[in-house]
Amino acid sequence: MVYTTLLSYKNQLQEDKAMKNKLLFIVCSVLFTGCQFTDQTVYQQQQICKRLAEGYLTTQNQQMYEFWKLEQNPTQGQQHTIKLTYKKPNENGLILSGLLLPTVELECTLEQQQIMVSLIQAAGKQVRVLEVQLPDATNDIPRNLVQVAQSKIR
């Protein structure tokens, strides 16, 4: 493309810049709409469950297992359930989805003021391995569940 004047070249640069800005806006919009923002209570429960599960694995001398997947099960009334999957990396330290690596599956249930962690055995049977009773909120101050669980574990 040959520009006959400096003015036409300047106009073309401005149009190119405007087009790049529009394209950047569209790309950012698409990327950010794919992001999923988690409710604060759900996030707290997920963090508590992950910490309790990792604590359980440590007490069982299975700390080499690494977090693989978290599945949020549908809420049933006041009961919230999360399934946590941990896999043992291969000899190269990698966790590949196609490989049949040793796996530990745990289910964490929050019901009222109680958190229960169960081990899901190969046959599908669940064995409760950990139970945490949260203190009742004596006043109307909302409690941070992560801090309460940490103080109960120590």
Image: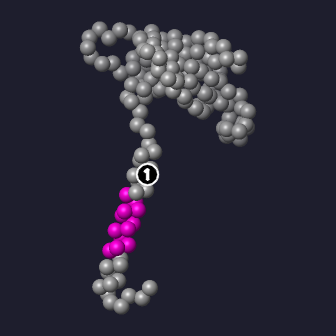
Q: Which residues are magenta?
A: 14-25
* In the image, residue 134 lies in the stretch drawn in magenta: no
Residue at the limit of the structure toward the left, as seen here: 140
Q: In the depicted view, which residue is nearer to us: 101 or 3?
A: 3
Q: Circle 1 is placed at which residue position?
A: 30
The reply, left or right, for residue 56 in relation to residue 42 is right
Q: Name which residue lies at 32% across and 74% down.
A: 14
Percent position of residue 143, x then y: 33, 18
Q: Position of residue 89 (x, y in %)?
A: 68, 35
Extreme bottom residue here?
Answer: 4
Q: Main secondary structure of the magenta part?
A: helix
Q: Please say whether residue 76 is visible from this viewpoint.
A: yes
The location of residue 57, given as percent across then percent down, is 61, 21
Q: Percent x, y for residue 59?
A: 60, 17
Q: Amino acid at mark 1?
A: Val
Few, some or many C-alpha atoms within 10 Å of disc 1 (few <14, some 14-19, many ≥20)?
few
Quarter of the figure with residue 84: top right
